[in-house]
Image (tube, rainbow, N blue to C red):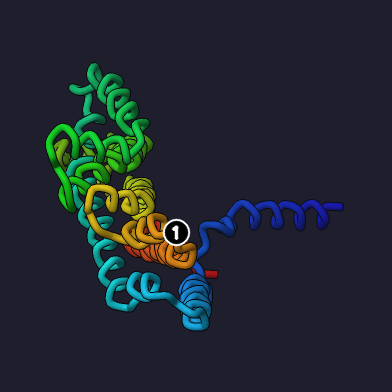
């Protein structure tokens, strides 16, 4: 009887100390799965398009130079807008978690949330109509306005979830408020902040297709060319390339999320 109880206790203790499956670090085989799937999709798309009898319009829209140029513009749109979003949202999120901003915090968050509820295409059209603001820069403004909320809220949540006892211990060791923020709060909030950055990246890749409507470039121009000329194949190629790019950037952001986590918070490999 006592032996059975002891075994059960050991088993329960082992369950409590196990790392959750979702938190375990994947082996190198797991990291190769997504790139191989995306590569297979691209190869299948290439084989399918190569087997089609393209007319002059389709051939002009789907030549390698045009696709590579559009993809590069799309990556630039997503990358630049995300960097600007980080520069704005992370410091603002830090400020909004400080005690002296407590009164204005709900109003500012409500204002930003309402701004995000406005469709991106509406923001781009307003910029174009009201300020004659077209092209790459106008698209960047629209993307930043749309992606700022996930990074801002995740920064606030990450900082606010840090255990107060840890902060008190830091202050007890003689650290200043800035040192506590830099050495304790921000490192412990990194996983949540990175999740917001990852979300913003994927949002920007998807919404960057709308930049084509204000001459902002990107893969949206391929899709729009297919729509205006009624070429379904061109539309499909543009949509598939956008989807693959979004999944690839999400995958790379996931790798960065794991690599940039503080050492003590990284999942253990099984």
Q: Which image quadrant is residue 92 in? A: top left
The location of residue 29, given as percent across then percent down, is 52, 77
Image check: 29 left or right of 57?
right
The location of residue 267, given as percent across then percent down, is 46, 61
Image check: 38 left or right of 177?
right
Residue sticking out furthest to the top: 103
Rendered view: 128 above or below 17: above
Taking the spot 34% from the left edge, 29% from the top edge, the residue there is: 113
Q: Does the image show residue 155?
A: no
Q: How many marks?
A: 1
The location of residue 47, given as percent across then percent down, is 51, 82
Rendered view: 250 above or below 127: below
Residue sticking out furthest to the right: 1
Image check: 101 left or right of 261?
left
Rendered view: 114 above or below 37: above
Q: Does the image show residue 203?
A: yes
Taking the spot 49% from the left edge, 75% from the top edge, the residue there is: 45
The location of residue 2, given as percent across then percent down, is 82, 53
Secondary structure, mark 1, is loop
Taking the spot 31% from the left edge, 52% from the top edge, the residue there is: 208
16 and 68: which is toward the camera = 68
Judge the density around disc 1: few (<14), some (14-19), many (≥20) Cα neighbours within 10 Å: few
What residue sits right under mark 1 in the picture? 230
105 and 231: which is toward the camera = 231
144 and 95: which is toward the camera = 144
Taking the spot 48% from the left edge, 67% from the top edge, the residue there is: 233
Q: Quadrant of the C terminus?
A: bottom right
Rendered view: 197 above or below 259: above
């Amino acid at each position: 009887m006592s032996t059975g109880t002891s075994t059960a206790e050991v088993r329960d203790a082992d369950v409590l100390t196990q790392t959750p499956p979702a938190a375990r670090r994947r082996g190198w085989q797991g990291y190769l799965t997504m790139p191989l799937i995306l590569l297979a999709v691209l190869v299948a798309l290439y084989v399918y398009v190569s087997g089609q009898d393209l007319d002059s319009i389709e051939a002009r829209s789907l030549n390698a130079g045009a696709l590579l140029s559009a993809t590069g513009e799309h990556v630039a749109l997503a990358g630049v807008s995300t960097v600007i979003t980080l520069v704005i949202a992370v410091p603002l999120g830090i400020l909004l978690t400080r005690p002296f901003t407590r009164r204005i915090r709900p109003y500012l968050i409500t204002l930003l949330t309402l701004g995000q509820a406005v469709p991106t295409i509406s923001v781009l059209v307003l910029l174009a109509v009201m300020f004659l603001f077209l092209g790459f820069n106008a698209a960047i403004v629209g993307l930043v306005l749309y992606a700022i909320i996930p990074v801002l809220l995740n920064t606030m949540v990450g900082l606010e979830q840090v255990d107060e006892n840890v902060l008190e211990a830091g202050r007890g060791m003689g650290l200043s408020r800035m040192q506590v923020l830099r050495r304790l709060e921000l490192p412990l909030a990194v996983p949540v902040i990175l999740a917001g950055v990852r979300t913003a990246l994927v949002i920007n890749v998807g919404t960057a297709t709308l930049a084509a409507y204000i001459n902002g470039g990107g893969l949206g121009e391929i899709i729009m060319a297919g729509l205006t000329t009624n070429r379904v194949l061109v539309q499909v190629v543009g949509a598939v390339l956008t989807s693959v790019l979004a999944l690839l950037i999400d995958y790379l952001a996931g790798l960065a999320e794991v690599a940039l986590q503080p050492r003590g918070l990284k999942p253990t490999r099984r």
